[in-house]
Amino acid sequence: MKKLMSMILLIILVFNLAACASETEPAAPAPAVAVSETDPLADLKEVTLSLNHVGAVDHPYHEGSLKFAELVAEKSNGKVMVDIFPASQIASGSKAIEFVQLGTLDIALESTMALSNFVKEVGVLDLPFIFDSKEEAFKILDGEFGQHIASLAEAKGFKILGWWDNGFRTMSNSVRPITSPEDLKGLKIRVPESKIFISTFQGIGAVPSPMAVSEVFTALQLGTVDGQENTEANFYKNKYYEVNDFYSVTNHIYTAEPLVMSLDKFNSFPPAVQELLMAAGKEAGDYQRQVSLKLDEDLLTLIKDTGVTVNKLEDPAAFKEAVKPVYAEFEADFGELLKKLEDAR
């Protein structure tokens, strides 16, 4: 009997041990993760940035700006929004850059001419006949040279979010077609507020009249100036054909359109917002360039259809010769940068 009881107890013990062995410890709950650790924008208060540009609502500037606003909103989950002010509603030219500097305006899509008044080195991009094509300009601006210029702008308190496209500049006036530098003698031509442009047009015999782009149509209409120089898109979109009878394709200067923000404003945001602003500026800039290139295919036909007299330079050599003194004048400012640019080609 004792042996039987011992065997029964042993069997019960074995079954209990087996049951215990088959049980598993419940998994420890995962440590709670703060929302801000998974979403770097979770603690960001909603903010709206202002963006001003000089183009009409059907201009590539505006289409690019809309894309930028869309991308910023998407990348920030709606935490950062962008209000767009087209057609110089807030300011234009140097005044727009000044407003960015003062914090009155958050972002300006402005020309290199305007920015060069605050960052002198940017002016190297405005030298006459420095680029042969848009593709060449894009390659150089997207590479080390463009990054170098952007770093020089940062040293002066500006953050370049992207290099967008303005285009090659041409001339129009109400007096005669421009086929050679001699045709510009004595003509009052509106130019941007830029020393390089003033020197360039003085060199080819014109009377340069610097003014903001928002004033140009009225100045042409009143005869304050005889003509203007700008891109095909700006000539057409701003309806200068209503006040100028002659349009000459000179392609004398290529103009980039940097998207500019105050460095202090940029640095006021956490790294995640800074990254998305830069990414959106590049992506929207690529989109804007494509819109601009597509428009280029049709613009000259559209301009001809307005009834203005259109001519192209058969040989720009005379113009290139006439502007050589401009390079000599700015050698002290841009000599080293020109070497860097040549190396980037």
Image (spheres, grey):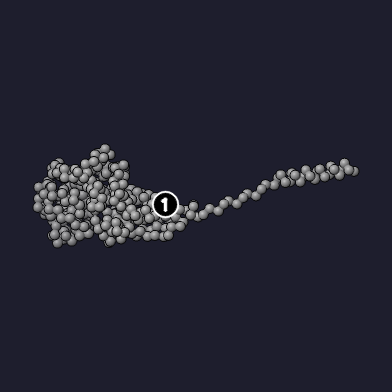
Q: Which residue is pictured at 63% across the width and 49% down the height? A: 27
Asked if residue 176 lies left or right of residue 273, the reply is: left
Residue 250 percent across, percent down from the top left: 17, 47
Q: Nearer the viewer, residue 89 or 179?
A: 89
Q: Quadrant of residue 319?
A: top left
10 Å neighbourhood of mark 1: few (<14), some, or many (≥20)?
few
Q: Which residue is pictured at 62% across the width and 50% down the height? A: 28
Q: Quadrant of residue 87?
A: bottom left
Residue 257 percent across, percent down from the top left: 27, 51
Q: Which residue is pictured at 37% across the width and 60% down the height? A: 48
Residue 177 percent across, percent down from the top left: 13, 50
Q: Nearer the viewer, residue 64 or 333?
A: 333
Mark 1 residue type: Ala
Residue 299 percent across, percent down from the top left: 24, 51
Q: List the residue tagged with mark 1.
A: 272
* Extreme residue toward the right, this view: 1
